[in-house]
Amino acid sequence: MFHFTRRGARAFASKLALTVVALSTALASPVLAAGKTLTAVMHSDLRIIDPIFTTAYITRDHGYMVYDTLVAPDSNFKIQPQMADWKISDDKLTYTFTLRDGLKWHDGAPVTAEDCVASLKRWAAVDGMGQKLMDFTASLEATDAKTITLKLKEPYGLVLDSIGKPSSRVAFMMPKRLAETPPDKQIPEQIGSGPFKFVQGEFQPGVKAVYVKNTDYVPRKEPASWTSGGKVVKVDRVEWITMPDSQTAVNALQSGDIDFMENLPYDMLPVLEANKELTIEVSNKFGFQTLGRMNFLYPPFDNVKVRRAALLAMNQKDVLDALVGNPKYQKICGAFFVCDTPLATEVGAETLVKGNGMAEAKKALAESGYDGTPVVIMAPGDVTTLKAQPIVAAQLLREAGFKVDLQATDWQTVVSRRASQKPPKEGGWNMFFTNWVAADVSNPIANLSIGGQGKKGGWFGWAEDAKIEQLKDAFVRAASLDEQKKIAADIQKEAYEQVIYIPLGQYLLPSGWRKSLTGVLDGPATPLFWNIDKSE
């Protein structure tokens, strides 16, 4: 993958914030912490707790605590058995998955193949790779209590990669009664078969989320590797503490009041790196792509000419300098499918990466028929990696001639609101910004944002583009890497011409933890909390 070349003391505030958390915990919860407790400040507050309902990474991270997967990738990108082994028929049309012994749901019921079939169908209804897999699927059924049989209409080489994809949305398994919940509605309870149990009674959105070790979980015998292998839990309890102020969280990490901080502020890295009690590492070596997404349903971005003007106004360097500001951790990149990969190309990205499109943007907007409709941009202020993008974009759009309504909010409100198809005047939106890990955008099938399915099955923004969907079908049937490269370039060309979304560059994100923690895993979907031990 790619490689990059680049305080104020508020300890009292940190202590006060932690005291408030501790008091609220003591008052609200009958469950007392026992044994080893690992405390973490994640990149975002957790509010939506159904990992199929949303692609938000904090919900994906929650999913890995509570749920498990049939198969999963290791650090060599190879799919490995997790809940199930598999066999493939000689004609490549039948995949038979056999559940391993000893799998139980958190309520004590055994995991069955019917549960897994229902889970796969719910996931596949809304995930890009799942949807494409179902296009090639003739039948998916439980042939006995432990056997899942997937029959294809024609050979499809991405079956295991789809079911084992490590990031949003992940094909997490859940009981049939929960998996039968329509994917546009949230499941009513959190019952998985994973290494941790969710403590519903201690869940306080905006304050904390609590997980305890699942003592009934039987890990695989293989060493942990990315999201595969033995998920051995070595602590008794994990608490995700909400601290929207990054300085407060940094102070808490340095003082030892928390053990782990997922996203470290770039401007505080020199101080943190000098602290000998801390480990500072980039756990996800593949990095993130940051992007802007427009709403295709309503003016002004239902007009491709207006979308094109907005694209021309954007400037990756301005966004990355505001977001990161450190050459070591940022990279200008116009590739939809991530730079330094086999599918990387700069087709269509010239003004975006050179930052020289403003004059052309003003001209294009003047000729587009734009009538001054305000562009409603959702601007979350509580996630360090999402603060800069809407502010910079609003400034650039205004310079190009757009009227902009920049609406301050928090990320979980964005996650909820972006699912609304209502007009902006009725609580909808015109534009939001998000980040994908490289694993989620590295090919046209994994990249959910590149889809053109429209209102039925499309990602938030609901772009409709039959040509992209046809090219994606051609991509999965391609017989060689060279053919895939050509098709991927054609998809990128169309995506830029129609402004399906705006890639705004790539970045790496360091995490920090106390040296009392050992066994912190790396991978494309971190952090993961199994395999971590804590010395007292």
Image (tube, rainbow, N blue to C red):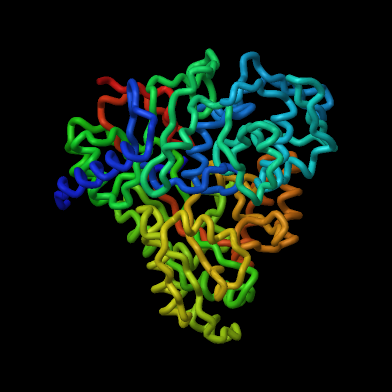
Q: Pick whichever, 524 or 102, lies toward us.
A: 102
Residue 392 in the image, given as x and y percentages of width and height:
38, 67
Observer-nearest of 233 and 87: 233
Give x and y (percent) for residue 526: 44, 36
Q: Quadrant of residue 109?
A: top right
Q: Where residue 242 sits in the image (x, y, percent)?
A: 35, 45
Residue at the spot 46% in from the left edge and 59% down from the top edge? 504
- Residue 520's place in the image compared with 452, above or below, is above
Q: Is residue 390 left or right of residue 495?
A: left
Q: Is residue 423 shown left or right of residue 21? A: right
Q: Is residue 317 above or below residue 214?
A: below
Q: Is residue 303 above or below residue 266?
A: below
Work out whether residue 276 or residue 58 is closer to the camera in this orientation and state it: 58
Q: At x 76% / y 26%, what residue is drawn?
A: 148
Residue at 60 percent of width and 42 percent of height: 188
Q: Is residue 266 left or right of residue 360?
A: left
**Residue 80, visible in the rendered structure:** no
**Closest to the observer, 173 or 349:** 173
